[in-house]
Image: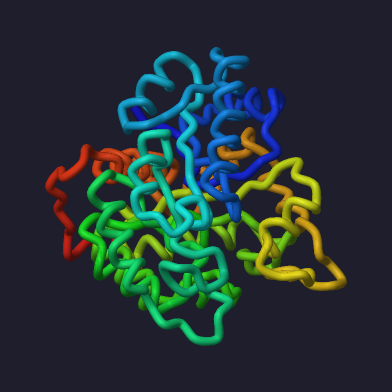
Amino acid sequence: MNPLIDGLQYANWSEKVFRQMRAGGVDAVHVTITYHETFRETVLNIERWNRWFERFPDLIVQGRTASDVTQARRTGRTAIFFGAQNPSCIEDDIGLVEVLHILGLRFMQLTYNNQSLLASGCYEEDDTGLTRMGREVVAEMNRVGLVVDMSHSGERSTLEAIEHSTRPIAITHANPHDWHPARRNKSVAVLRALGQSGGMLGVSTYPHHLRGGSECDLADFCAMIARTADLIGIDHVGIGTDLCQDQPDSVVEWMRSGRWTKSLDYGEGSAAAPGFPAMPGWFADNRDFGRIAGGLRAAGLGEAEVAAVMGGNWLRFFETGFGPPDAPQSRPTEGVGR
């Protein structure tokens, strides 16, 4: 079985999107359920997802373990795994890590661009690394099986998270900085450390992360994936589209500004282009994953390598990342090349 798994989406969820997932053969998606929301507000978002699971049981099912991907594929549905793009949902209470894991959370970023109680974001001038609470929370996330995600974190914080975590971490949606120098993209040092520790990179189709933006060429994108696989190991590369399909621009304002500022923060955008950028023509929605797979073949990847990048690697990562509390974890020290 070769599953199709997307490491990150934040769409304006609807029956249309769920049906497009099925039309595209998507077996599992890590979905963002919270940014700056408090614990109670995050629970309300989970309630909303519970209603969608109730309304569309033939299309989607909640995912909690790797085996749920296999079951979803067998029954023709898409497994939905919850994630948080900021630790606001645990407020200042480490006990909420386990509570949210019980409610289904499987990924949590330690920062979203800014300094948090746990680590420094990629937009901070000074990256002070993991905080005292950050080290404690990472240990608790390791214990319960909640994946540490450093997609929006700074360089030092990311390297310290990789070093401190006893389980491999993920960067669910980013690209190499030397391919496109966006603040959100990751350095060679981070990518190498990620691969050597057994972690996962989800390559992003979000235009601000792409060389050429919305006009990025599919061949260039897939050649970048092949080079990244050579750098960190084919087993550590997956897809993390960061698809924000059908979202109004008010949502990107919330993502960037939250409640931390009275001003508009443009993040990766600008005053001239403050909203969501147009997706590249080769990836508009969940029905377009086949184009990426075809591009990877054209870039020289073999069928087994294409299957690994399109979902097999994420499935293996889920098997260890979502394991039971206190399960022993192994961390490979090598794995470069493909």
Q: Is residue 103 left or right of residue 162?
A: right
Q: Would residue 203 be seen by someone viewing this image from the given angle?
A: no
- Residue at 37%, 40% (x, y): give it: 99
- Residue in the image at 34% along x and 67% along y: 133
Query: x, y (%) of residue 242?
Result: 59, 51
User: What residue do we see at 42% from left, 66% from top?
Assistant: 227
Please state, as top left, top right, bottom left or bottom right, where the C terminus lies in the image: bottom left
Q: Which image quadrant is residue 197 in?
A: bottom left
Q: Residue furthest bottom?
A: 126
Up-down relation of residue 305 to residue 49 (above or below): below
Q: Is residue 316 left or right of residue 281?
A: left
Point 73% across, 49% down: residue: 281
> Percent x, y for residue 204?
55, 56
Quadrant (top left, top right, bottom left, bottom right) of the N terminus: top left
Q: Position of residue 11 (x, y in %)?
A: 66, 41
Please say whether residue 92 is visible from this viewpoint. yes
